[in-house]
Image: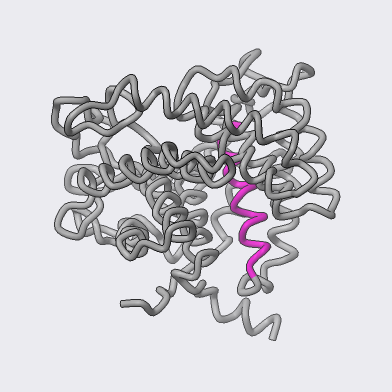
Amino acid sequence: MNEPLAVEMRLDHMERMTDSTGMIQHAVGPVPDFATGYTSDDNARALIAALGLQSLPECRPWSGRLARLADRYLAFLVYAQRPDGRFRNFVGYDRRFLEELGSEDSFGRALWALGETMRTQPNSYYGRVAAAAFERAVPHATGLSFVRAQAFALLGLCAAWEREERRVALEPLIGELVEGLVAAYHRHSGPGWPWFDEALTYSNGVLPAALLRGAVVTGSKEARRIAEEAMDFLTESLIIDGVLQIVGNHGWFPKGGRPALYDQQPVDAGAMVLAYATFWSVLGRPADREGARISFSWFTGRNVEGISLYDPDTGGCKDGLLAGGVNLNQGAESVVAYLLSAYALVKTGLALPSLPEEEVRAVG
C-alpha cells in the first residue's frame, strides 16, 4: 500500500475556536468555552499548523483564511513573551495573564513555533517578527530541565537552522540539547526499556523525532542510533495488531509496569504521526511509513474502541478516547493535533489533502 492516503480536512473548527485574541483553549461539544481562555501552548501549535498548511500547494484555496489565522497566533505569542524572552502560558478571556511564567513545555512549544515560522516564512513579515521573538527566547533553550521541553525546543532550533544564515549560531545550541537528550537516555534506559525517562507519558513521539532532527544537524551517530532505538521501542509498545494504542493518561506506562489504556489523547496520536513522518522523511524506513498511516487512522476509527474522533461535520476532533466511548468536547489541542497530523503526512508525501468540494470549486 504505497499510494498516498486521502486525508479529510476542514478549517471550520479551527476558525470557530479562534477569536481576535487567539485560539480558545477548550470547548463544550464544538462550541468554544470562553471561560477557559487561551494558552501559549495551543496558539504555538496552531501557528505551526496554519503556516504549515499554507505552505502546501494543495491548500491554496485556504491561503487567505490561513493567513488570518496565522496573524492571530503569532500576535498571541508576541503578546505572551516576557521582556526576558520567556513566555507566559495561561491567559484569561479578558486577555490578562494568569501567571508570571509559563511551564517549560510551553516555552519549548513557543520556540518550536517561532522556528517553524522562520523556516516556512523566511522573507515575510511573519519571519521577521518570529525571528525577533526567537532571538529573545533562544538564550533560555539550553537551561530547560524536562526532556519534552528540550525536545520541543530542539525542533524549533532545527527548523530555524534550515535558514543558512542561522547555522553557525545555532549549531552549538542544537548540540547541547542533543547531548542533553542522549544523557537522559543513558540515565534511564536499561534492558527492555530504551527510553529517556522512567515512564512513557505524553507526547512521546516528540522525543525520538527531535533527537533524529538534531542528529541530522550535528552528524552524531550515537544520537541517531538512540533515536532509532527509542522509536522502535514506541512501535513495539504502542502498535498492537496494527492498531495504535496510545498510553492512557490514567496511569501512563511506568518502567517495569503496564501501560494504561485510557484516556487516550489526540495530541499523543499526533506526536506519533509526527515521529513516523520525521523518520520516514529522514531514513525512508518502510516501517515508519506504515506507522504514520496507522497512527493517523487512530483519529478516524482505527483504535481500540473503533470510534472516529475526527468530526467531518464540524472539522473538529473529540478530546479523548475513553473506555466505551469518547469525550465529546472538541477543544483547541485536539483539532490542531488532527490538522498537524494531516500536514505531516501531506508534507512527506504519505497523504493527499481532501478539501471540501465547494472550497476547491470557489478557487476554480
Q: Main SS type for the magenta part?
A: helix
Verify whether residue 161 appears in magenta: no
List x then y, in percent, for residue 10. 54, 65
Figure check: 342 above or below 223 = below
Q: Is residue 55 visible?
A: yes
List x then y, in percent, for residue 152. 53, 35
Between 237 and 87, the one lying in front of the other is: 237
- Res. 204 image quadrant: top left
Figure check: 290 above or below 82 = below
Q: How is the image coloured?
A: one colour
Question: The N terminus is located in which quarter?
Answer: bottom left
Verify whether residue 54 appears in magenta: yes
Q: Start and end of the magenta stretch?
A: 38-56
Q: Is residue 18 visible?
A: no
Q: Residue, x 48% and y 24% (percent of image)? A: 180
Between 59 and 308, the one lying in front of the other is: 59
